[in-house]
Image (cartoon, rainbow, N blue to C red):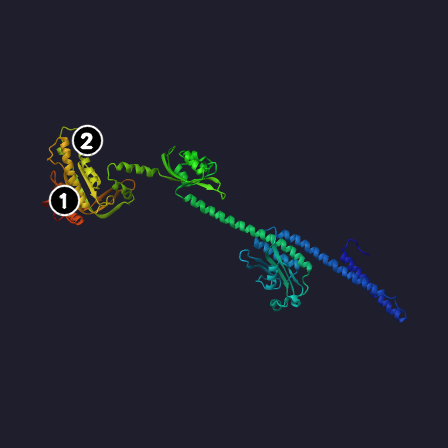
Amino acid sequence: MLDGNTHPINDVQRLKVYIAEVIAALNSQAEILKMRGMNLPPGATQNLESIDRDLTALQKHMGGEDTELAQLRALAATSAMINSSLDLDDVLARAIDEVIALTGAERGYIVLRNSASGELDFRVSRDLETGQSSGFQGSQTILNDVIASGQPILSDNAYGDPRMQQVSTIAQMVLRSVLCVPLRYKDQITGAVYVDNRLRSGMFSDREKGVLSAFANQMAVAIENARLFMQAQAYLNDITEIQEVMGNVFSSIGSGVITTTQDDTIRTFNAAAGDILGLAPEIAIGQPLETVIPALKDDIINRIEQGESAAFEAEFEHAHRGRLVLGLKLSPLKDPEGQLQGVALVADDLTEQREREDRLNILRRYLPPAMVDNIEDIANLALGGERREMTCMFVDVRPFSTFPSELRPKQVMDLLNEYLAVATDCISDFNGVLDKYMGTEVMALFNTQINPQPDHSWQAVAAALEMRERFVELYARQGLDPTMHLYRVGIHSGVATTGNVGSINRRDFTALGDTINLSHRLLENAAGGQIIVSEANIGYIQHALGALPDHIHLQNHDPIKAKGRQQFTTVYEVFRT
């Protein structure tokens, strides 16, 4: 009796067994009846054999449906499985294993096409015989045809298939069963799935072709999702790296960098901006720009809002730093459509520079402009010196012993400053550098780094001669005898060491060496009203000018022996004729 709880294909199998038993029994009875001269009714066994054949066909049909149902169930499960991962290599590895399981193939390959170059990339392979992954060993021609046409190819006996007779790899590899289906994503062929069997014919049918095609469609979606995810990951990594680089650059920029939104709210604020404005970035972000930099003018803001760039200086009183001078460069930030999205602002702290310029402007009242322009270069020199040819002048404008004894100290100081002013003006007029004041004496240098002069030896002498005339004028204004000549001058030219001396925080620019010492020695040997110069100074003048000017007269003086020198120095007194 048939059992309703059993699988129908098993019931069919039992019916076939019963029929076989009945046919065997009938055949046995037929032999017995034949011996007695009798026969079974015509067609008795033929009808049963026909029923058996029908049951065999039914059993085969039911088996195919079960196989297809199992494949469809496996297809649903594997589709969900491969779509559960966004790692492309993991998706491909899972997919090839399921392809082998679904089709029962001996070997399987998944091939992807590079969208940019069109070249084929043999990503994964499986070989059940060797148990190893290897390069593509199937038919390249079949694979190319499937990718080119977008149509699957099935051959249940490739070796004997007339369509495959011209394919050399079929014969060389003795391929029997071959199935290749395209990977299709949005009407684009992105690759192919290829399976084969080298030994068995009829391994694949239309059922396997349909199942594998359906699976390939799901696989193409999973592969594309994984590709897009990997691209997104790569883009994200690139963006993260770029952001880190930009962050490092943004933090390391010496200038303050500020960006705002369209409503002038601060969006970014680097560390340098915080140092300049004395405000932590986390506090500044979110504040209105005008709150952080109150010196922004309405016309500047209007220009930025109209999409124009601007560069200007802003000066204002800072709550903690006092006077603050900023150099500002503002540029509009626009989207691809040209719509204003905010402002980028670069701020440089010019406070110290402007204070230095203010000090230099004050110095220009006392020093030649060309000399002042070189002061910044001197400030950049390291501590130490540079040996160079130069001329040194010492002037004693009026010894203290010649001042009236009844004068009070302040009166003496005021009177002394009048004489020092005459000497200072003459030195400046001839581009000399006033090195220092020492009581009634003045030390001046010509041809330093501050005041380079090819004719420095003559400039010093010319300044001294001019000084003589101006002192005479001063005597006249003070009601003194113009011929009393209270000043003394000593000038020498040679090599000296010039540069900065002192410390990092406090330094002076000066000159040291034998040239300086000898110049002062000449001053000490000069009498009132005398301009004493060395023979070396005259030699420098002749070299620079070719000869002494016609209006210059020299008078020999006794040679002197300066302290620390063995030889005598030939000296002259200089007059203007």
Residue type (three-letter) at the residue carrying disc 1:
Val
The residue beneath circle 2 is 414
Q: At numbered mark 2, what does the secondary structure look like: helix, strand or loop?
A: helix
Q: Distance from label 1 to label 2 (Cα)?
A: 30 Å
Quadrant of the image occupied by residue 485: top left
Total numbered circles = 2
Q: Residues within 10 Å of mark 2 (few under 14, many from 20)?
A: few
* Residue 489 in picture, x, y percent from top left: 15, 40
The answer to whether residue 536 is left or right of residue 69 is left
Q: Quadrant of the N terminus?
A: bottom right
Q: Earlier in the sequence, mark 1 or mark 2?
A: 2
Q: Quadrant of the C terminus?
A: top left
Q: Nearer the viewer, residue 188 or 271?
A: 188
The residue beneath circle 1 is 533
* Residue 462 in picture, x, y percent from top left: 17, 42
* Residue 322 in picture, x, y percent from top left: 36, 33
Residue type (three-letter) at the residue carrying disc 2:
Asp
Quadrant of the image occupied by residue 470: top left
Q: Is residue 497 above or below residue 128?
A: above
From where the camera sits, is residue 262 visible? yes
The answer to whether residue 506 is left or right of residue 419 is right
From where the camera sits, is residue 399 visible? no
Quadrant of the image occupied by residue 74: bottom right
